[in-house]
Image (tube, rainbow, N blue to C red):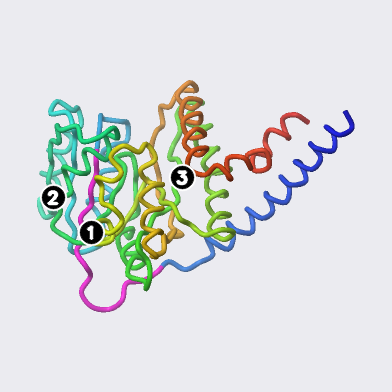
Amino acid sequence: MEGLAYFFLILTAGAWVYQFLALGCLARFFGQPLPALPSGPSPGVTILKPLRGLDQGARECLESFLAQDYHPFQVIFGVSDPQDPVLPLLAELRQAYPHREVEVLVCPESLGLNPKISTLRQMEPRARYGCLVIADGDVKVAPDFLTHAVAALLEPGVGLVSCPYRAGPAATLGARLEALTIAADFIPSVATAHYVEGIRFALGATMILTRPVLESSGGLAGLADFLADDYQLGWRVAQTGLTVKLLPEVVETRNPGMSFKDYLAHQLRWARTYRVCRPGGYLAYGITHALVFSLAC
């Protein structure tokens, strides 16, 4: 019994050390200045937005990509179902932003086990520009997102840029718990990994890279049967010798109606994915999840 008490004491001490380390990493990470574009013409950007369904807040999220203070850029929306309920909204947005390069594609083919990657593979050939932004449908960004993301991508040695994300307004218990988990667990763990071991993975909410880098890392086809496609893409880019850069700009995800059951299912799926992708970090859950010890006390 005494040995067990010492074991939990060591875990608790490790959890305290981790919490202070995470706070220091967060302060250092968000204290960085955002990169600025060099003078001269900016490279063209194609934003690839695979979508499925019509969620609350979808208009605001999609419009945030159409309202970018950047030039030139193209937006491609892709759906797999020709009857997808988001299609009427996409038609409205095309009419509302006639000055933007906007294309809506129906991507009915099933190219692998990952439906998001399947849709992206059918969208990519329509991209006009060499810089590609892959962004989830429920993500909202600031008007200067492209400016900072492209500036970071142009830094020497950078192969891929992604951003941490936070949860937007929450209307249910599940959504509030999701927001708390992202803010108190996910973002601190990413900031800590950034300084302790370096980032060799991407965060799937927003990812930006060039087409040559995508091709040299195996292309979208190489991700067709992976669930954690963002992790795989970042890892493969890092294997080419290029840097995966985390931009100190937080984007926002929207899932205000998540139920408590949905929250638990999402956390279980995330834990399983994390166990496969980063087994060392998964084993450290006993230290990084200090909330368990707090509840026990």
Q: Are marks 3 and 2 in contact (CB under 8 Å)?
A: no
Give the amino acid at mark 1: Arg
Tell me the distance, in whole angstroms, between the alpha carbons under discs 3 and 1.
28 Å
Residue 215 in the image: state x and y as whole percent.
24, 56
Tell me the distance, in whole angstroms, between the alpha carbons under discs 2 and 1.
11 Å
Q: Residues within 10 Å of mark 2 (few under 14, many from 20)?
A: few
Q: Residues within 10 Å of mark 1 (few under 14, many from 20)?
A: some
> Could you say which quadrant of the image residue 130 lies in?
bottom left
Instruction: Report the residue at 44% width, 58% height from top.
Output: 246
Kind of element beneath mark 3: strand
Q: Residues within 10 Å of mark 3 (few under 14, many from 20)?
A: many
Give the amino acid at mark 2: Pro
Labelled disc at residue 166 = 3
Task: Report the side of 296 relative to 240 (left or right).
Answer: right
Q: Earlier in the sequence, mark 2 or mark 1?
A: 2
- Whether 2 is among the magenta residues is no
Kind of element beneath mark 2: helix
Residue 194 in the image: state x and y as whole percent.
53, 58
> Which region of the structure is painted magenta?
35-50
Q: Which residue is mark 1?
A: 211
Number of callouts: 3
Q: Earlier in the sequence, mark 3 or mark 1?
A: 3
Give the amino acid at mark 3: Arg
> Could you say which quadrant of the image residue 59 lies in?
top left
Q: Which residue is mark 2?
A: 125
Labelled disc at residue 78 = none
Q: Nearer the viewer, residue 29 or 6?
A: 6
Task: Report the side of 289 relative to 80 (left or right).
Answer: right
Quadrant of the rendering where the N terminus is positioned: top right
> Could you say which quadrant of the image residue 115 lies in?
top left
- The mark closer to the camera, 3 or 1, is 1
